[in-house]
Image (cartoon, grey):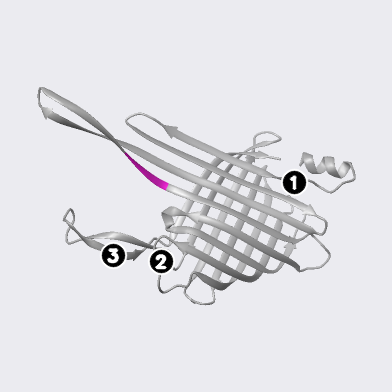
Amino acid sequence: MQGDETAEAAGGEPGWSGSADWNLASNWGNSSSGSIGLAGESRREIGRFRLLIRGGLLRASTDTVKREAFGAADSFEVSRTVESKVSADRAHLRTRISQAQTDRPVQFFATAGWERDARAGVKARLDLGAGIGASFGETPVEGELELGAGMSYTHQSDEVVDPDLSSGTLGLRFDMRAERSFRGADLALIAASTWSLGSRDDLRLDVTGSAAFPLSRRLAFRTSLQTLFDTRPSLDRVRLRAFPGGPALGTVIVPRQRFDRILMIALALQF
């Protein structure tokens, strides 16, 4: 990046480098909907350490307009009500600090992350981790592969509390990051998995694959697909009816879906 080249030419340490993604969609009329997606990544080497920060926000909502008429057929008034529904509300922030590329095959790393996923029933999830990792490759053409394994601590607050799971758990964490340039496109695969030691059937995966196609020196077109998997998803409280359309008899607790997928198509500003 230009910032890195300038700092190195001046004899100083490389500065911040990274990218910022942005997409926006909206419509108005008889119904209205809007979505916003933000994502960013920044990295820097400070002395013998490498700092990486990632974050993102995804929110989508729909407003449905309902009209009803009151009065006689030849004389009536129309009332207008708007029902709002949020179909996506997710935010996350993660930092990782590790040793910079050295002659040693193994380096130490530590991570900290926070996320919220309202539609998946997660009000807040905080996770901390530390372990050892290894890096291979140094150039975009050859590619770069980074692997890590260590311990993690996760504290999760759900919309509906699961009595069979503890809010704070220790676990094993495995990370992988692979990047490579291929025919003008920058490809990346980032994966993280956490296996709870307190509940052997509690496994969480987070895999994101992306491809960025440069449009100019600073601007790129990026598409990514993120897959989230949880063997013990958050619970949901739903209404119970004796038959479809019948009166509500109360509520029951059911698990949510194990898989969530997020497709993002955005413009990326590289710095």
Amino acid beneath label 3: Val
What residue span does the magenta drawing correspond to? 83-87
Residue position marked by numbered label 2 in the rendering = 161
Report the front residue among 213 and 61: 61
Residue drawn at (49%, 47%) of the image:
263
Query: In the displayed structure, would residue 154 be above or below residue 35?
Result: below
Report the front residue among 269 and 157: 157
Pointer 1 and pointer 2: residues touching (CB < 8 Å)? Answer: no
* Majority SS type along the magenta span: strand
Q: Residue 7 placed where, x, y %? A: 84, 43
Q: Residue 141 placed where, x, y %? A: 73, 50
> Would you identify the image quadrant in which residue 72 lies?
top left
SS of the residue at dot 2?
Answer: loop
Residue position marked by numbered label 1 in the rendering = 16
Chain-order first, disc 1 or disc 2: 1
SS of the residue at dot 3?
Answer: strand
